[in-house]
Amino acid sequence: MSEFGEYIKKVRDDKGMTLGQLATYSGISAAQLSRIENGKRGIPKPPTIERIAKALKIDYEELMIKAGYIEEPLKPQPVRPDFEITDDIFNSPKVLYGNGLRESREKYGLTDSEVAEKTGIPPKVYMNYENDEIPSPEHGIILQKFFNALNKKKEKEEKDIAKRMAQLSTDLKNAEGLAFDGEPMSDEARESLLEALEFGVRLAKKNNKKYTPKKYRDNE
């Protein structure tokens, strides 16, 4: 029995179909089908294979591969994402490298030497990672935890700023006798003042920031 014929018989048996039924559904004589299954004749031509595939309700291309007419396509290799910060990043197999790593560093206003210093990764090695070299498992974990810590800190800072600005907005609305250039302060002027205050708060935080993610290399 040929490999192709054996495959046809297995599929037919798995579907609970008799040789006569396959002959009826495909329009091919039972005698010819029997010879195909038993390997007593060569591989049938593509039109015959197509009729068998339709009768068995299986993929025509798959059957053509089994018959040797076409080569089995190579399985696509998984693409490793450049960079993605998620809440479950510690449990994620994602690897930080390439353009994504560079963009995330720039997002937090860090230089490559600063990241290298804070993570303990040699500067030349870190630069290789930004140039598309995949990090070692140890360095991959370090980078994941480092940027995850920065992300969480940034989220906390944004919440703190929003809370502070909400309080300032309330204070300005409740304040009496506010004036600018000798005139009572309008709503538009209050909004402009709040925008200026928010800019000042962000600038002060940026200039006062001396932050290294605490214990980012320790297992949690």
Image (cartoon, grey):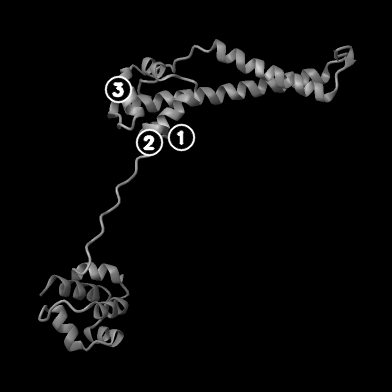
Q: In which image quadrant can residue 205 be found?
A: top right
Q: Nearer the viewer, mark 1 or mark 3?
A: 3
Going 42% across and 28% down the picture, which residue do you hit? 102
Residue 169 spot, x, y in % from top left: 75, 21
The span from disc 1 to disc 3 (Cα, nearest Å) is 25 Å
Q: Nearer the viewer, residue 30 or 132?
A: 132
Name the residue type under label 3: Val
To which residue does mark 3 refer? 125
Name the residue type under label 1: Thr
Question: Quick one: which residue is furthest to the front in this view?
Answer: 131
Residue contact between numbered discs 2 and 1, judged by CB atoms under 8 Å: yes
Residue 199 spot, x, y in % from top left: 66, 19
Residue 87 spot, x, y in % from top left: 47, 33
Is the residue marked by circle 2 packed among few (<14), some (14-19), or many (20+) residues within 10 Å?
Answer: few
Going 16% across and 76% down the picture, which residue do you hit? 43
To which residue does mark 1 refer? 86
Q: Nearer the viewer, residue 27 or 180?
A: 180
In the image, residue 81 sits, relative to residue 117, either above or below, namely below
